[in-house]
Amino acid sequence: MENNFIISQNDWDTIIAYAQMSYDKWKTEIGGMCVAILDKETKTMVIKDPVIGKQEVSSTLCTLDKGWLADYYMEMAMKHGTDVRFVWWHSHHMMGVQWSGTDTSTMKEGSNGDYSMSLVVNLKGEHTFRVSWWKPMAGHIDTKVKIAGPEFSVTKEME
């Protein structure tokens, strides 16, 4: 299932940089959002454009501001149309990438749709990605995201 979800190396590095900055500056977690757009040709969800917004952070929590989230959802829908999905991401700085009780409660806030996606990272570059579905019955699967680095190949010029 890992190859069903992909993020560019640059976007991945942005998330890790936000996590590192927050830990270095305040010793806290940090969270944000990304968009996920279905690539119909490859049938993969491309996760992109990670951002942070107004939030409260602590060593074990990050709570995104509801007003900022509403503005973000509207802005991304206007930019990408109705086919856009959202991914909530957050850091666990030096801890593992298992979901906490607070994390699963936060995920349930997205249960008004058919499914939602969440990502937790740490400063070692480890991660867990969860797809939660809410209808007709609730469930989830934890998997990994493929981090797509630059593809290199031997060119005629190199030969």
Image (cartoon, rainbow, N blue to C red):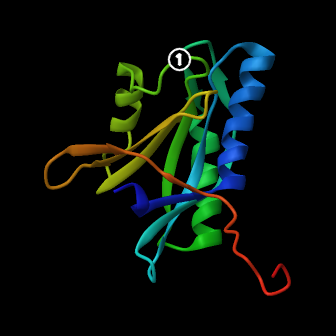
Whether 95 is drawn above or below 46: the answer is above
Horizontally, is 152 left or right of 42 in the view? right
Across and down, in percent, residue 143 comes to 36, 45
In the rendered image of this protein, does residue 154 appear above or below residue 28? below
- Figure check: 46 above or below 62: below
Give the secondary structure at mark 1. Answer: loop
**Image coordinates for residue 25, horizontal then vertical, percent:** 80, 18
Q: Amino acid at mark 1?
A: Met
Q: Residues within 10 Å of mark 1 (few under 14, many from 20)?
A: few
Q: Quadrant of the C terminus?
A: bottom right
- Could you tell me which residue is drawn at 68 percent across and 37 percent down? 16
Position of 140 with respect to 31 (left or right) is: left
- Per the image, the residue denoted by label 1 is 95
Q: Residue at x 20, y 44 (%)?
A: 139
Please determine whether, in this image, residue 144 is positioned above or below residue 121: below
63, 1: nearer the viewer = 1
- Going by the image, does 108 lie left or right of 79? left
